[in-house]
């Protein structure tokens, strides 16, 4: 009569030992070795292999209508200026020159987010005045929503100078995000939702470009105007104003954030669990450490 395997199931074998044995010590060591390394790996990896991920997002940008303009009218340090800050304008005295300004923001692709700022300014000049350099500062509100909610106030700064007096400066650049550290991947990030220029301050130092840029550049998150090709036009007719035309784009940004370490930790733990399961099976099956094996179905020893 031929025999064949009609059914099979794995047999459960219990290994018993008392508390003060090598087998107990072995078990304690195995448990420690299984759970501690994954934690160490996760802990070390925060500073070791800093994991960073990126995502793309077009920011929500609005021009805040705050402007500061300084134009050098000679090579000896004479200048005229204008701003949207009444305290500063008062301090400028005879150097204040009120330009005509036109501002238009466009949503070119109709996706509900503005894509471009058109900023035009005409600065009236006296017949004997010439423009040798321009410093222009504009402020923006800048927001991101996709991962963490970022709300900040930021600026664009342009400086151009020439040894030849000009009639017009044309700039066309991108307002780029400058990230010194990764952004949190969730929550509200609004520590930079503060005015770049304190317009309520009556002190001249608050409007000093050096101070403003110094404080701004200390920030971990800011914007910078990338404008590699300014166009300076020379030859101004005596009575005509100096023209400044700026087109500032709000482009799609690649944003960096720290990636989640939980996954790495879980993976390492699974590997360790698997390895130590094998080791324990080998040790107990082969009675490397003495225990009392009890196959399934036999009465339990106490
Ligand atoms: C950001 O600041 C503006 C004005 O200072 C305030 O109205 C707004 O609620 C602030 N937003 C957040 C998210 O902090
Ligand atoms: C800016 O980043 C540095 C380095 O990560 C950090 O030490 C500092 O606290 C951050 N500053 C703010 C205001 O978040």
Image: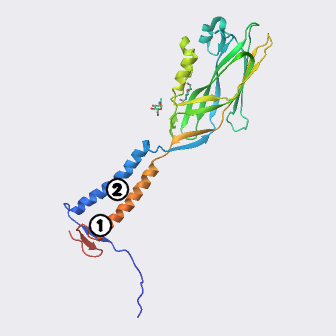
Residue at 66 percent of width and 33 percent of height? 250
From this viewpoint, which residue is outermost toward the left?
20
Q: What percent of the width, then of the height, locates residue 111? A: 69, 39
**For the point 24% across and 63% down, which residue is it?**
23
Residue 7 visible, this angle: yes
Q: Residue furthest front?
A: 163
Left or right relative to 79: residue 258: left
Q: Of marks 1 and 2, which one's residue comes earlier in the chain? A: 2
Quarter of the image for the N terminus: give it: bottom left
Question: Would you place residue 12 above or below residue 52 in this image?
Answer: below
Q: x, y (%) of residue 184?
A: 50, 38
Location of mark 1 (residue): 283
Could you say where residue 118 lies in the image, as x and y percent from the top left? Answer: 72, 26
> Do the numbered discs 1 and 2 sit on residues whose CB atoms are within 8 Å?
no
Is residue 247 something that shows in the picture? no
Circle 2 packing at 10 Å, graded few (<14), some (14-19), many (20+), is: many
**Quadrant position of residue 160:** top right
Residue 126 circle label:
none
Q: CA distance from mark 1 to mark 2?
A: 16 Å
209 or 299: which is nearer to us?
209
Residue at 65%, 26% in the rendered image: 63
Q: Quadrant of residue 301?
A: bottom left
Q: Position of residue 302 (x, y in %)?
A: 20, 68
SS for dot 1: helix
Q: Residue furthest top?
A: 94
Task: Using the image as rendered, state which of residue 210 and residue 66 is in the foreground.
Answer: 210
Residue bearing mark 2 = 34
Disc 2 beta carbon < 8 A from ligand 2? no
Q: Secondary structure at mark 2?
A: helix
């Amino acid at each position: 009569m031929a025999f064949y395997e009609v059914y099979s199931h794995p047999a459960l074998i219990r290994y018993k030992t008392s508390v003060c044995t090598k087998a107990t010590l072995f078990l304690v060591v195995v448990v420690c070795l299984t759970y501690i390394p994954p934690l160490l790996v996760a802990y070390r990896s925060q500073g070791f292999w800093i994991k960073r991920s990126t995502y793309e997002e077009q920011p929500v940008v609005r021009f805040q209508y705050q402007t500061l303009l300084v134009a050098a009218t000679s090579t000896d340090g004479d200048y005229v200026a204008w701003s949207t800050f009444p305290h500063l304008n008062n301090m400028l005295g005879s150097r204040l020159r009120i330009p005509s300004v036109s501002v238009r923001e466009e949503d070119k692709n109709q996706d509900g987010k503005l894509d471009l700022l058109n900023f035009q300014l005409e600065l009236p000049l006296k017949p004997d005045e010439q423009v040798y350099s321009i410093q222009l500062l504009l402020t923006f509100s800048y927001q991101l929503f996709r991962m963490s909610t970022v709300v900040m106030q930021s600026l664009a700064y342009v400086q151009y100078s020439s040894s030849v007096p000009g009639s017009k400066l044309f700039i066309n650049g991108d307002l780029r995000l400058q990230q010194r550290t990764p952004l949190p991947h969730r929550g509200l990030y609004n520590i930079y939702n503060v005015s770049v220029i304190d317009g309520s301050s009556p002190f001249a130092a608050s409007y000093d470009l050096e101070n403003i840029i110094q404080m701004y550049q200390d920030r971990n998150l800011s914007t910078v105007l990338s404008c590699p090709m300014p166009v300076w036009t020379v030859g101004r007719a005596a009575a005509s104003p100096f023209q400044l035309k700026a087109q500032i784009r709000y482009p799609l940004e690649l944003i960096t954030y720290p990636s989640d370490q939980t996954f790495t930790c879980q993976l390492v733990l699974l590997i360790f669990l698997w390895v130590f399961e094998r080791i324990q099976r080998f040790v107990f099956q082969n009675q490397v450490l003495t225990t009392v094996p009890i196959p399934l179905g036999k009465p339990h020893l106490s």
